Image: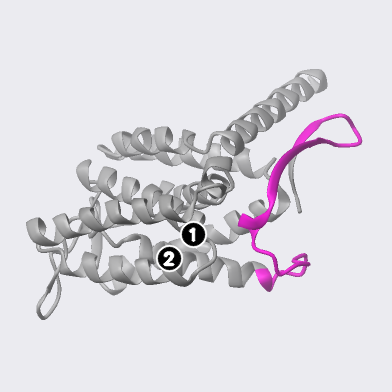
Amino acid sequence: RSSGVGTGAGLLGAVAVALTRLWLKLPWVVLGLIPIALMLDQSPAGQLVADVVVWAVTLLILSNAPPRLRRVMLVCVPISLAGELLLTWGLGFYDYRRHAVPGYVPAGHALVYGAIFVLARQRFMRRAAPRTIAAVWMGTLLLALTRLIGWHDTVGFVLFLAWSLVLLVAPRRAFLLAMFFLTTYLEFLGTSFHCWAWAPMAGPGLSAANPPIGAPVFYICLDLLCDATVRMLPHYRTKVTISQYNVNAMTTHAGAPRVTMEA
């Protein structure tokens, strides 16, 4: 029996290592997991399956993720849940299909948030020239204007301008671009599957499309809160943000492969 347990634990560890390495090298795999979870969310039983699948993948990745990335993903779970409760039940900005935050959402936020960090460290993102970033921003501006004119998305356009201002002054432009595309992709998928819906009116003279194009601004707030929380942890020993580290693979003293981050 002990041999069987050991074999099972070893197999699970190997799966965790393989999954984490795949995720660190190809963060786009998150793009494939998101629609699967949202399609499962079409029924109560399917939502339960989505909860189990997303949490299982998240825990497997966390078990072998680089320490600094693991910490920021862990603090992301409760912070994102608090944000979800504030924006849905507190402010009424949007609502979920069954009027409750699905169980897979906090874990999904941690996966997406971690994927943004990893994606921002990809070579093609780090080497993006200012002209390339400007060209990409022009494309997002056209999208925002289309949503403003065609869907009267005034809230989304204001949020987009706020995101653009942060993009102009912040040093982590690759991170912000990755954030914009991943979260926009997430929002359009979730609303298309009717997993959640944004309120059409957000105040006098303001209206929001479903979804508003500037929703990534809320992820900027999540990033600031997660970064501030990680800085207060006792094991945090540097002021360098996680997105400034290189992702490498190393072998532990026991010979088991493990993914780590080194400065």
Q: Are marks 2 and 1 in contact (CB under 8 Å)?
A: yes
Residue sitting at 61 percent across and 56 percent down? 243
Q: In the displayed structure, would residue 98 be above or below residue 161?
A: above
Mark 2 lies on residue: 167
Q: Looking at the rendering, in which quadrant would you find the C terminus?
A: bottom right
Q: Which amino acid type is marked by label 2?
A: Leu
* Residue 204 in view here: yes
Q: Quadrant of residue 38?
A: top left
Mark 1 lies on residue: 173
Q: In the displayed structure, would residue 198 be above or below residue 117?
A: below
Query: Where residue 252 appears, x then y in whole percent?
Result: 86, 37
Q: Is residue 206 magenta?
A: no
Residue sitting at 23 percent across and 60 percent down? 212
Residue situated in front as seen by the camera: 180 or 218 = 180
Q: Secondary structure at mark 2?
A: helix
Give the residue furthest to the right. Answer: 253
Label 1 crowding class (10 Å Cα cut-off): few <14, some 14-19, many 20+?
some
Query: Where residue 238 appears, x then y in whole percent?
Result: 75, 67
Label 2 crowding class (10 Å Cα cut-off): few <14, some 14-19, many 20+?
some
Q: Which amino acid type is marked by label 1?
A: Arg
Residue 260 falls left or right of residue 112: right
Q: CA distance from mark 2 to mark 1?
A: 6 Å
Identify the mark at residue 58; answer none if there is no mark.
Answer: none
Residue 217 falls left or right of residue 3: left
What residue range appears in magenta? 231-258
Q: Is residue 245 magenta?
A: yes
